Image: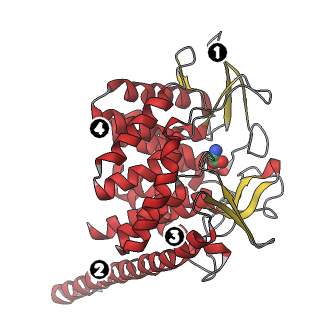
Amino acid sequence: MNIPAKIQFILLLCSTWALNSHAQNKDRQMEKLIKKNMMFAAHQYKLLAKNTPADKMPRNFSEEKQTLETSNTSWWTSGFFPGSLWFIYEYTRDSSIKLEAEKRLAILEKEKYHSSDHDLGFMIFNSFGNAFRITGEPKYKNTIITAAETLAKRYRPSIRAMQSWNAGNGFAAPVIIDNMMNLELMCWSADEIREPLFKIIAITHANTSLREFYRSDYSAYHVVDFDLEKGKVRAKLTAQGSHPESAWARGQSWGLYGFTMMYRYTQEKSYVDHARKIARFILDHPRLPKDKIPYWDYDAKDIPNTYRDVSAAAILASALLELARYVEADERAEYLHVARTILINLSGKKYRSKKAGNGGFLLRHSVGALPYQSEVDVSVTYADYYFLEALMRYKNWLDQ
Ligand code: GLY
């Protein structure tokens, strides 16, 4: 059947209009979802602040026991509460949220000298980094630079990496995949004060991680233990995963986020190529559930009768929203679609706290360290933090 040219033209106009209006509706739906979550977050985090003594940070909330656990500022998660407050302030401009963030930074600042493990990136960059980005206050920058100087001392030339934990518990010089996340503190500081050494350390560490942590399917070991004298790998194993050869879910998300971030600071193609391969491992995984909220370990023995890890999902969404900037259109569309799916699902009843629930945390159902029965199926600050970061990153996509 021959359709006259005029009708063909009208049909083309109609379908273009339909596609555009569908895309616009989707965007409006996400705009609304972001706004609702940010308003909810402002409400919840005021409650969380009230529930948390002034010299402590919130750590987790158990729904089963209805208990809030707090921590000292020396615990690895201490930067996430103030960091989240800064995201909420950035969106809402609520001055009481800003005041709370400033108070929590004041108790956290001493950790710029924290030298007993590698967690300074999490503690200082996610908190003071956001504070500096949003306010431009020079005092925040000074804290970050001091923290980078402290972290640089954990660099071990013989293994070409920063040692994550001290020797003990059967480990000699353990490095964990999570350490990729601390490299942003080093890269940012290097660029800010033109100190190439910090960036050299970060790049060297990333290259060692790329070489030593990844299996042929682009899943990562959790821990690589080194022999400092011989400068060699002693063992590849796990601490928080199901078993040594398993793919611990949060570790896969840390790696994806870390290599994507390293590409931003270096423009080194091997990092973005590697991140894309990690993304394939995750997104094509037969045991990644339809709602894209991973089980706590992709190789957990009792899937599907085991826990999800919402923190792994939130980090994954945030990482994909950055990786989407560095790839071609089809891949970009896929990453944005998965991130959107995660954000929508995390905003639903199954994964988001009830209003005034969970002590003020935003999200439910994360897993800290199941092999130690520690923080299993609870709310944690880092899930909230990366959820908020992902919402802000999605907003940036909508605003551009
Ligand atoms: N070490 C940080 C984590 O549990 O992911």
What residue type is disc 1 on? Answer: Leu
Question: Is tag 2's residue or tag 3's residue first in the polypeptide sequence?
Answer: 2
Q: Which residue is mark 4?
A: 192
Residue 20 numbered mark, or none: 2
Q: Are the residues tagged 2 and 3 within 8 Å (C-beta)?
A: no
In the rendering, at what x and y percent does residue 8 appear? Answer: 22, 85
Callout 2: helix, strand or loop?
helix
Mark pair 4, 2: CA separation: 41 Å
Q: For the point 53% across and 72% down, which residue is it?
A: 45
In the rendering, at what x and y percent does residue 46 appear? Answer: 52, 74
Q: For the point 34% across and 73% down, which residue is it?
A: 93
What residue type is disc 2 on? Answer: Asn
Mark pair 4, 3: CA separation: 32 Å
User: Closer to the camera: disc 2 or disc 1?
Assistant: 1
Q: Nearer the viewer, residue 66 or 247?
A: 66
Q: Considering only vertical position in the picture, is 115 above or below 341? A: above
Q: Which residue is mark 1?
A: 228
User: Closer to the camera: disc 4 or disc 3?
Assistant: 4
Q: Is residue 38 left or right of residue 76?
A: left
The furthest residue to the left: 6
Question: Is tag 4's residue or tag 1's residue first in the polypeptide sequence?
Answer: 4
Q: Are the residues tagged 2 and 1 within 8 Å (C-beta)?
A: no
- Quadrant location, the C terminus: bottom left
What residue type is disc 4 on? Answer: Glu
